[in-house]
Image: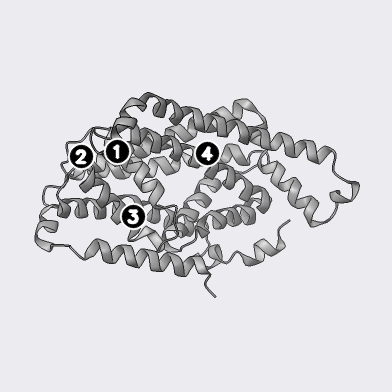
Amino acid sequence: MKGWKFWLGMIVGIGALVLFARDLEWGPFLNAWEDLSLGWYGLGIFFFCFSFFLRCPRWKLLVSDLGSVSFSLLARAFFVGMLINRILPARLGEVARCVVLKRRAGLSLVGLLTTVAVEKSFDGLALLTVTALALALLPAGELPADLQPLFEEHRAKILTGAIGVPLALLACAWMTPILLAFWEKRRPTGAEVGWMGRFVRSGIAGLATLRRGSQTLVVVFWTGVVWLTLVLSAYCALRAFGFELPLSAGVVLCAAIGISVTIPQAPSYVGVYQLAVQGIMVSIYQIPLQEAKAFAIGIWALQIIPVGIIGFACLRSLGTSLDQATHVEKELEASE
C-alpha cells in the first residue's frame, strides 16, 4: 500500500507538469535547443556529478565512529540511494543507502540513519545560506515594489544573516550530542538493555562526529564545496543555452531548485522542478517563455539522468537488484 506522501507527490507533480506544458509552443521550444553548447552542457554534467561525489567523503567522516567502511563501498551505496531517489518518491533512497551499507559493512542502521539526518541538516543550513544570498543577489527591481526599499536598505544585514543564522543553528546542533552524552552517562540502569537503550546509543554514535569541533569544521567545509560545485553546474547550464547571465544567477537557480524539491512530488521531481526553473528564468531574468521551458527541461536532464546512470552502474557492481535495495522493511524491523 502506497503512503499518502506518494499520492500527494503524484498529484502535485502531475498538476505542476500540466501547468508547465499547457502553454508550450513546439516551434520556439525546439528552436531553443539549436544553439545548445555541448561543451558547457557537458561541463555542467561534470560539476553536478562531482558535487554528489563530494558528498561521499563528508558522509564517510560522519560514519567514521560507527565502524570501518571503505570509501568505494560507501560511495557506491550513496549513488544507489541517489538512483532510488530519482525513480521513487518520499526520499526512500536515503534509507536504502543506509540499508546497503548495513548489509555490506555490518554498521548500525539507526546510527547510519542518524548520520544521514545530520548530513541533511548541514544541507538545510547550506540551502538557507544560498537562499539568503540569492535574495541579496537578485537584480534591482525584481522584488515587489512595497518590499524593494526595505530590502535595499537592509541588504547588508541579509548578507550577514546568510552566514550568521546557519552558524547559530550549527552551534545548536553542536550542543545536541553533548546533551545526549550527558543523558547517556546518567541514564537509569534499566535503560542499558532493551531496544530503546540500543536505539539511543546508536543515535548518539551517529552524532559522535559533531562532538569534535575540528571534524565538524571539516563537514562544514565539504558542505560549502558541494554547494559551490552545484552553483558552478547551474552556471554552466545557463551558458550552454547561451544565456549571458552572471554567476549569481547560478546561486539564485540553486536556491529555487533546492526549495522546490523539498515538497512532496512525483519521482525524479517531474513537474515542480520545471515549473520552478521556468518561473525564475521568466520573472527574474526576463528569458522568453519557450526558451525558459527548454532550459528547465535541459537542466533537469543534466541533474537527474547522469546521476541515475552512475547509480545504476553502482547497483550492478554491488551485485544487488533494485528490488532488494528498496525492500527495507525487514532491515528496519531487525534494527536496533
Decide: few, some or many residues near mark 3? Use Cα within 10 Å; few <14, some 14-19, many ≥20. Answer: many
**What residue lies at 66% left-to-right and 61% top-to-bottom?**
332
Whether residue 43 sits left or right of residue 70 in the image: it is left
**What residue lies at 72% left-to-right and 47% top-to-bottom?**
202
| Coordinates of residue 153 in the picture (x, y in percent) | 33, 25
| Coordinates of residue 23 in the picture (x, y in percent) | 18, 63
Decide: few, some or many residues near mark 4? Use Cα within 10 Å; few <14, some 14-19, many ≥20. Answer: many
Q: Which residue is mark 2?
A: 239
Q: Which residue is mark 1?
A: 146
Quadrant containing the C terminus in the rendered view: bottom right
Q: Which mark is residue 273?
A: 3
Q: Is residue 254 above or below residue 304?
A: above
Task: Name the amino acid, label 1.
Answer: Asp
**How far apart are the two marked residues, 4 and 1, measured between alpha carbons?**
33 Å
Whether residue 230 sits left or right of residue 264 in the image: it is left
The residue lying toward the viewer, choosing from 197 and 147, is 147
**How far apart are the two marked residues, 3 and 4, measured between alpha carbons?**
22 Å
- Check disc 3 and report its element: helix, strand or loop: helix
Q: Which residue is mark 4?
A: 122
Task: Name the amino acid, label 4.
Answer: Phe
Q: Quadrant of residue 226?
A: top left
Q: N-terminal of the two: label 1 or label 2?
A: 1
Q: N-terminal of the two: label 4 or label 1?
A: 4
**How far apart are the two marked residues, 1 and 3, measured between alpha carbons?**
28 Å
**What residue lies at 60% left-to-right and 64% top-to-bottom?**
328
Task: Name the amino acid, label 2.
Answer: Arg
| Coordinates of residue 220 in the picture (x, y in percent) | 52, 31
